[in-house]
Image (spheres, rainbow, N blue to C red):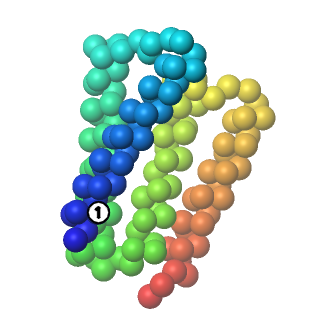
Amino acid sequence: MATLSLAWARAGSLITGTLIVMLWCMVTCKTPKWEIKRTLWAGLVSGSVWQIGNVCQVIAQSYYLLPYAIAYPIFQASLVLSGILGIFVFHEITGASSIATFFLCATIVVGGSVVLALYGPV
């Protein structure tokens, strides 16, 4: 049953993403630049790293009996690393107030993961 719902979730994501791009093209009267040679590698590496983290989460839950309520927030805290790379390597976030807001939110996310790890479900 879980596999079926995962298939529906993926199909829904594909359809929704396609509709959003089509709507954007209609509203802006522009077609997106598909720079596949420049961006395909980044997408494949990004997806692979995400999936490796997902597999590690499953291993932590299955073999080390880490509860889902702890494993999933720690896994989601990995987005903080993505944000840090976006700020310092790719310069996607600029401006002192935007960067300060990011780090404030990142501190809350990581702090919540630590609290769950220490005092979460037993």
* Side (left or right) of 88 relative to 104: left
Q: Residue at x 66, y 58 (%)?
A: 108
The quadrant of the picture occupied by the N terminus is bottom left
Q: Secondary structure at mark 1?
A: helix
Up/down of 35 relative to 100, above or below: above
For the point 30% across and 47% down, the residue is 11
Residue 68, x across and y down, in percent = 39, 74
Q: Residues within 10 Å of mark 1 (few under 14, many from 20)?
A: few
Residue furthest toward the bottom? 122
User: Looking at the rendering, which quadrant does residue 91 occupy?
Assistant: top right
Furthest residue in direction front, as rendered: 26
Residue 53 seen in render: no
Q: Position of residue 48 (x, y in %)?
A: 27, 41
Q: Is residue 85 visible?
A: yes
| Residue receiving disc 1 | 5
Q: Residue at x 45, y 13 (%)?
A: 31
Count the numbered circles shown. Answer: 1
Q: Is residue 48 left or right of residue 106?
A: left
**Where residue 117 sits: x, y (%)?**
50, 74
Pick out the residue farthest to the right: 97
If the image is split into quadrants, where does the C terminus sit? bottom left
In the shown orientation, is residue 104 left or right of residue 117?
A: right
Q: Amino acid at mark 1?
A: Ser
For the point 65% across and 54% down, which residue is it?
A: 107
Judge left or right: residue 74 versus residue 27: left
